Amino acid sequence: MTSQRHPSLRRYDHDARISGWLAAALLLLGLLFGGGTRSDVFSDLVVQFCAVWVLAYGVMKLDWYYLPTERRQMLLLALGVALVILLQLVPISASLWAWFPGRDEISHWRKELGLSEPAFRPWTTAPDASWASLRALLPALALLVIGVQMHEFWRRRLLAVILIVALISVPLGLAQIVQGPDSELRLYTPTNNQQAVGFFANRNHYAALLYVGLALALGFFLTFDRNFRDRLNGKGLSQAIGWTLLGAFLMVGLMLSRSRAGVGLAILVTLFMISVGFMRRKKHRLSNYWLVGLALSGALFASFFGYSAFSTRLEGDWLDHSRWQVTSTSLALARDYGYLGTGAGSFPAAYAAFEPIDLLGDKIINHAHNDWAELLVEFGVPFIALAGLFIAWLIARAPALIAAARHDGLIPLIPASIAGFLALLIHSLVDYPLRTTALSLVFVALLLQLLPSLPHDPASRGRYKRTKNDEASVAAEDGRLPLRKRLRVVEGGRRDRQSSENAAADGWI
């Protein structure tokens, strides 16, 4: 007699599967078509259009009371960012607008030039750019809304998508170099036409995807290495060699990108993951040595095939003075506009009006190449407040993440996600990787790995103590157990919950 699936389990599996595949599809679409650096790129508009539908589905399925506190807090932070941009677009009276810092001079020059002053103006100095920034936020917001509702099994699949696309982009970058500056495989114009850029317009953003992929490859290797000594035979040995080759492959791609920031952060990511490996228990010591060998062999392989391309970058000026001048001018601009900022997406116009005459050149400054400074210019004090809340959230999560990093299973992917996550934040000090749709989605996917697990049943949250059957039912609901075991453990969890609720009703607990 064949067992029948319980209706609630069948419905839950169906919803979880749809959410998981939608999140993976949006991430894949963003990685393939969201590598541009301008808001008017058609491929970005396609990703944003698809994100609207994913966001609508995520909001429709959202059960606020089911989510743990940390997941709610992350949603509130994202909502805060969107609300600040929306507030910047709210029309206010022209007299009040002119009273805001930095805007009085704009109003004065409009009068001097004989330009009419509208009765109402939005807070932002560039409304069209702010609308474009709000639109660009849609893919990351959609992935976050649907991602906070996903269990661990589906969240880990997002990491696999990132790693696969990173691996695919390496041969694409090699083909771009072979075909030369006019290669039709270069998807954007303008672009770095002498280097590998993969699915991006900028080599530094391509390198960012690769060092995140490298962190995840090392994390998957540490996940694979349970009982490493017993698995070094036949299939296990071939898998270990395979992970070594994957790491080396990504390192070659980093060399071909000729991104100094990318290569430097890749080295830091590798050292971080090696230290994570040695922090684990003694039974993993053999795999830790293999991890060191993976890093060294990958570095040698990458140096052999890609050092000649990267060496010219080592001979250049490591302290690009023009970038530091742009950053210092941006900070002065932030002080001039005070606590409210210039408005989301308005940096190019605001900087062009503020740029010192002795720094004027033939290049248009679209970004500060320091995203922290650029966000301070555009958002002012609200950016400081939101960044402070985000850092406080990370600090609050740190003890749980450190404790989790000492366990086995899929847990090595958590420090790998932290490594990629922090590398992107550090990279933002010298570039603007998170301004691209692709890397903003990668950032959210890594952030989702830091969230606590979901309770397995919304109706039972906080009403009984978790039992072994409950822990097993989490695995069952994630789809990680065979059907017969899934039904058995879920029914066992229900019996435990019913007993607990009966005892509570009788006054025993």
Image (cartoon, rainbow, N blue to C red):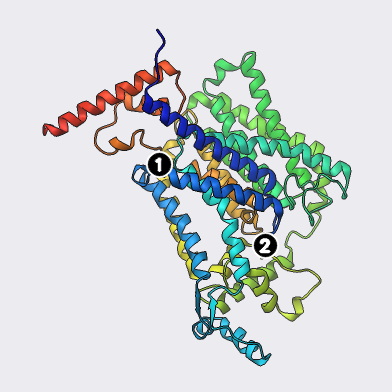
Q: Nearer the viewer, residue 488 or 394?
A: 488
How far apart marks 1 and 2 lie (CA) works out to 34 Å
Quarter holding the C terminus is: top left
Asked which secondary structure carries label 2, the reply is loop
- 374 w.r.t. 16: above or below: below
Give the amino acid type for the residue marked by disc 2 in the picture.
His
Q: Is residue 187 visible?
A: yes
Q: Is residue 267 visible?
A: no
- Rendered residue at 39%/16% (across/down): 4
> Residue tagged by mark 1?
400
Q: Position of residue 57 (x, y in %)?
A: 49, 44
> Residue tagged by mark 2?
369
Give the amino acid type for the residue marked by disc 1 in the picture.
Ala
Q: Nearer the viewer, residue 73 or 19?
A: 19
Q: Position of residue 192 (x, y in %)?
A: 80, 53
- 365 w.r.t. 477: above or below: below
